[in-house]
Amino acid sequence: MEATATERSSRTGGTPRKADLVADDLLRRIVRGEIATGTNLPRESELAERYGVNRSVVREAIKLLEVHRLVRPIRRRGTEVLDPLASLSPDVLRAMLQPEPGRIDRAILANLLEVRAHLDVEMNAVAAERRTDADVAAIEDAIASIRSSLATPRVYAERVNDLTVAIARATHNRVYEMLVAWHRMVHADTEEIFLAVRLASGQHAQGLELLLDAIRRRDVPTARALVTTYHEWATPRMLEAARALAGDPDIPSTATTETTEKRD
């Protein structure tokens, strides 16, 4: 049984707890609709038998689902399953993006990229309007680090993440900082797709320097235009990368079809 806990543990060298594994599998089943919204979870004894664990592990797993706001205990009625679309947990969206290990739902990816583009444009515009000299210095340092990482694409992409954090802080809006951290958790399973547009190249770094210049000059319209142009370029390439990774390049995905229709 593979799940997000297994994936996270493999990256950190740790061993996933049984409760994490059970919770992750139940989370995916709820997201996929195998356990329907409004129904009750199976009884603890049934879940313990299904997963080969004791009931205390099941109880802990259910508590984790409560944290994700996917279930709620109701006295004398059992544990009700809640609508996953009402959850703000990044792990829920990760499960929507990757309903099964190794498979990306490209329609959900398209939805995410659409929202991401809108938020990123506005975040950079607000940063250009509100930045302090200290914020500009932090963005300059982040871009210098990006420049020094051109020879190592994965490090380069991580440094771009650091730049995004610096820009979020320049907005002086804590919710933007939270959303950036939330997004980094969500895209942990789609790293290969993001690498398709976070190209370790002088041209990409130059584009970031143009954005820095706009933020430095408090040029809100230019900051907004630069980021809009980037997402117009990046979104179809990320969807194409997801299609290629799926191994069915001749079969158009829902996400690709929707994006094409919008462009037309």
Image (spheres, rainbow, N blue to C red):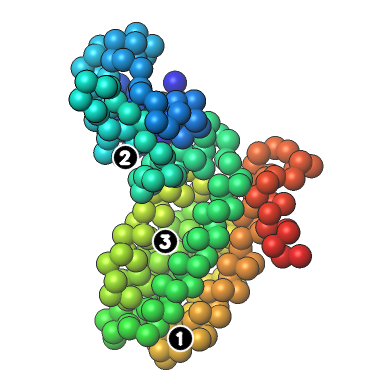
Q: Which residue is mark 1?
A: 220
Density class for disc 1 (Cα within 10 Å; few <14, some 14-19, many ≥20) is some
Rendered image: mark on residue 68? 2
Residue at 35% x, 22% y: name it.
41
Alpha carbons under labels 3 and 1: distance apart:
21 Å
Question: Does 4 sit above or below residue 57?
Answer: below
Residue at 50% x, 60% y: name it.
115
Marks 2 and 1 in Cβ contact (< 8 Å): no
Q: 191 or 183, which is in the foreground?
A: 183
**Left or right of 74 in this view: 236:** right
Where is residue 237 drawn, in percent x and y?
Answer: 65, 58
Alpha carbons under labels 3 and 2: distance apart:
25 Å
Where is residue 151 drawn, in percent x and y?
Answer: 52, 60
User: To which quarter of the image does residue 35 belong?
Assistant: top left
Residue type (three-letter) at the residue carrying disc 1: Val
Rendered image: mark on residue 163? none
**Left or right of 6 in this view: 96:** right
- Tell me which numbered mark, 3 or 2, is placed earlier along the sequence: 2
